[in-house]
Amino acid sequence: MDVLAFAFFWFIFAVIVGIAASARRSRDGLAWFLLALIISPLLAGLLVLALPDLAEQRAREDSRACPFCAEAVKQEAVVCKHCGRDLPAPAPIVRESWFAPNVGLRIATAVAVLMILGFFGLIVSALRSTP
């Protein structure tokens, strides 16, 4: 019964990590849940707390400083909303991806499914071996 309780709490804390990652850090909750299942809810939770909020990071990337008043304006802005001066055209943003889209998610899903099946196998074998 100890293994079953351990697996239950592991699962519950992994769910909490996924919810915290999604709600507080604007990250993919399912991916963080799966990561917490694989490595440890404690380690994944510490990683979630250590990483910056993606929404704030995207907001900073989508803005630039006005060269005249140094206030933040949107990348697409033509006129500064603070000083009213015409802005020069922004330099194009080139974002290179070193990782093919969805490949990481597929790998993480496959690993998570194997880990979950392993946990269920461990639970079933523990239940069968108890007299």
Image (cartoon, rainbow, N blue to C red):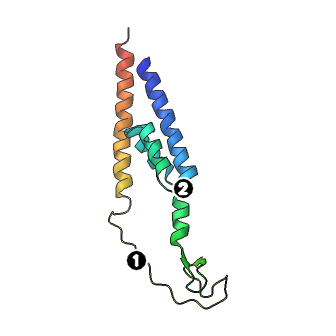
Q: Quadrant of the C terminus?
A: top left
What residue lies at 45% left-to-right and 32% top-to-bottom?
Answer: 10
Choose top left, top right, bottom left or bottom right for residue 115.
top left
Q: How far apart, in angstroms, are the residues tagged by discs 1 and 2?
A: 23 Å
Q: Which residue is mark 1?
A: 94
In the displayed structure, 4 sits above or below 49; it is above
Binning the other alpha carbons within 10 Å of mark 2 as few (below 14), some (14 to 19) or many (20 upward) gives some
Q: Position of residue 57 (x, y in %)?
A: 51, 64
Q: Amino acid at mark 1?
A: Val
In the displayed structure, 59 sits above or below 36; it is below
**Left or right relative to 24: residue 113:** left
Which residue is situated farthest in the front direction here?
Answer: 69
Q: Position of residue 92 (x, y in %)?
A: 44, 82
Q: Nearer the viewer, residue 19 or 113?
A: 19
Q: Position of residue 42 (x, y in %)?
A: 45, 37
What residue lies at 39% left-to-right and 17% top-to-bottom?
Answer: 127
Q: Amino acid at mark 2?
A: Ser
Residue 26 has which mark? 2
Q: Nearer the viewer, residue 35 or 74?
A: 74
Q: Say which label, 1 or 2, has the lower sequence index.
A: 2
Binning the other alpha carbons within 10 Å of mark 1 as few (below 14), some (14 to 19) or many (20 upward) gives few
